[in-house]
Amino acid sequence: MKQLTEKEIRAAFVNCTKGEAKRLSVPRDLAEHPWDDLDYFGWRDPQAPGRAYLVAELEGTVRALVLRSPGHTSGQARRSMCSICLTTHDGGVSLMVAPKAGKAGQQGNSVGVYLCSDLACSLYVRGKKDAGAGARLHETITLEEKIERTVANLAAFAAKVTAV
Ligand SMILES: [Zn+2]
């Protein structure tokens, strides 16, 4: 994806108030991330443990999502699979919850997703980050197809968040 500015990222949030989008922490070292290898840019909030954010260009629109990670549950050490990039980690996948956009979100509705805890799906898909033995399914599809699938999974998740 193309590198985004802090302003673009803040303007892209779909599931929080404008005030929250203005205040939440966006990394200062944006230029240092490998944007060319990212299908989405995700980060954890250093000031608010259990909060994470991601931003991606989906169907031509930049969208950013606020996520909450309910924290360490007993199931966390289990081997589980990220539902976005399909990487399996020992304890490296978190259940993250996105409040729904608009009125539904204000009423407490949310959408959950199992996501790589470090939000580095793009790097696992490209083999730039290793999640250990057996982490990736042996597949015959091309890298391009895997990337397309990752983006499609993310777009489907974002669509659920913004659906009324
Ligand atoms: Zn992942």
Image: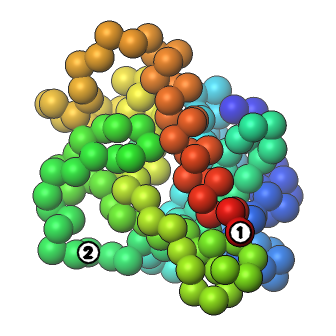
Q: Secondary structure at mark 1?
A: loop
For marks 2 and 1, give the one nearer the viewer: 1
Q: Amino acid at mark 1?
A: Val
Residue 56: percent from left, percent from top:
67, 45
Image coords of residue 33 (percent x, y) = 61, 40
40, 36: nearer the viewer = 40
In the rendered image, residue 27, in percent from the top left (x then y), is placed at 65, 59
| Residue at position x 51%, y 67% in the image | 111
Give the labeled residue for mark 1: 164
Residue 61 in view (yes/no): yes
Res. 132 mark? none
Q: Which residue is mark 2?
A: 72
Q: Which residue is located at x 35 percent, y 47 percent?
A: 82
Quadrant containing ligand 1? top left
Quadrant including the C terminus: bottom right
| Element class at badge 2 | loop
- Give the residue displayed 23% in from the left and 19% down from the top: 138
| Mark 2 and mark 1: Cα distance apart in space | 30 Å
